[in-house]
């Protein structure tokens, strides 16, 4: 159903919650509310299984302004219908920004299995989309700055993961994320970014900064243990 999704959200009742998966989850996060996304492995599925959920009692809150249709063919799910044609081109890039928790066996040790890589990839994709939706006054200034800086952070994390000047690139990525946080704050203070979207992006940026800071400290301690001085 999600592979053939025409541009609507399928909401499945699970206990006291409604859950949405894959394209439906993307639509909820990018059109309705910045929900926290769960990513997990599923046998036979290429890439992570993504899902979001909210209490069934909150349906009216999150469906306000949209048409809600009951499924008539059985299954008990609802459909949230948008009055617009949906371009799913950004969906795959968004999906790639999430890394499922690896299984105990067959663990992927490549650089793109690092949680921080997935987090930076995700914010780069979502920041690019967010920048394209800003008003003209900020789309090509602060919005473009955030887009370029998140891309630069992604490049630095990729290089660090491949072992190229690891400590230097981790530091570059951390400083880039601090730049992102400042730009987000400016957009919020200028009322160019809604409070919910500001909090959503800021929490992502702060989490990435914490992960990079921990990685940087770990690299520094490793060098100290080996008797190699860290760069000033």
Image (spheres, helix red, strand yellow):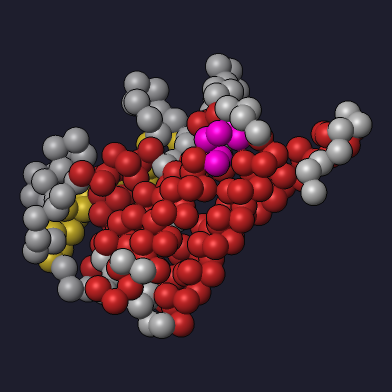
Q: Is residue 84 left or right of residue 41?
A: left
**Vertically, is 7 above or below 82?**
above
Q: Residue at the front extreme?
A: 232
Q: Residue at x 32, y 41 (%)?
A: 93
Query: Looking at this view, is 12 or 232 the one in front?
Result: 232
Q: Tell me residue 128's x, y (percent).
A: 34, 55
Lateral position of residue 180 relative to residue 17, left or right: right
Where residue 1 sits, quadrant-wise, is top left
Tell me what residue is drawn at x 52 percent, y 35 percent: 158
Magenta highlight: main SS: helix
Residue 217, quarter of the rendered image? top right
Q: Is residue 146 magenta?
A: no
Q: Position of residue 111 (x, y in %)?
A: 55, 29
Q: Is residue 148 visible?
A: yes
For residue 124, above or below residue 131: above
Between residue 142 and residue 89, name the one nearer to us: 142
In this view of the protein, which residue sits in the foreground, 74 or 190? 190
Q: Is residue 115 left or right of residue 92?
A: right
User: Which residue sits furthest top?
Assistant: 106
What range of the chain is rendered magenta?
156-161
Could you say where residue 3 lies in the image, as x and y percent from the top left?
19, 35
Which x, y percent locates residue 26?
A: 30, 50
Residue depicted at x 88% and y 29%: 226
Does 97 appear above or below 11? above
Q: Nearer the viewer, residue 210 or 78?
A: 210
On the picture, is 84 further left or further right than 193?
left
Q: How many marks?
A: 0
Q: Residue at x 43, y 60 (%)?
A: 146
Q: Is residue 214 above or below residue 56?
A: above
Q: Quadrant of residue 55?
A: bottom left
């Amino acid at each position: 159903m999600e592979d053939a999704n025409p541009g609507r959200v399928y909401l499945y009742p699970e206990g006291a919650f409604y859950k949405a998966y894959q394209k439906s989850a993307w639509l909820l996060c990018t059109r309705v509310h910045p929900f926290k996304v769960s990513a997990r492995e599923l046998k036979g599925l290429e890439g992570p299984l993504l899902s979001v959920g909210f209490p069934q009692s909150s349906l009216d809150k999150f469906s306000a302004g949209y048409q809600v249709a009951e499924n008539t063919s059985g299954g008990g799910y609802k459909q949230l219908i948008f009055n617009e044609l949906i371009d799913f081109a950004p969906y795959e890039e968004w999906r790639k920004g999430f890394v499922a928790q690896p299984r105990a066996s067959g663990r992927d040790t490549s650089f793109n299995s690092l949680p921080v890589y997935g987090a930076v990839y995700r914010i780069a994709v979502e920041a690019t989309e967010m920048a394209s939706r800003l008003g003209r006054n900020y789309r090509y200034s602060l919005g473009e700055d955030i887009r370029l800086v998140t891309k630069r952070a992604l490049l630095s994390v990729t290089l660090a993961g491949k072992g190229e000047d690891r400590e230097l690139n981790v530091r570059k990525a951390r400083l880039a994320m601090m730049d992102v946080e400042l730009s987000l704050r400016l957009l919020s203070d200028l009322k160019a970014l809604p409070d919910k979207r500001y909090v959503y992006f800021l929490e992502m940026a702060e989490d990435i900064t914490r992960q990079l800071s921990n990685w940087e400290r770990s690299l520094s301690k490793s060098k100290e243990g080996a008797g190699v001085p860290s760069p000033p």
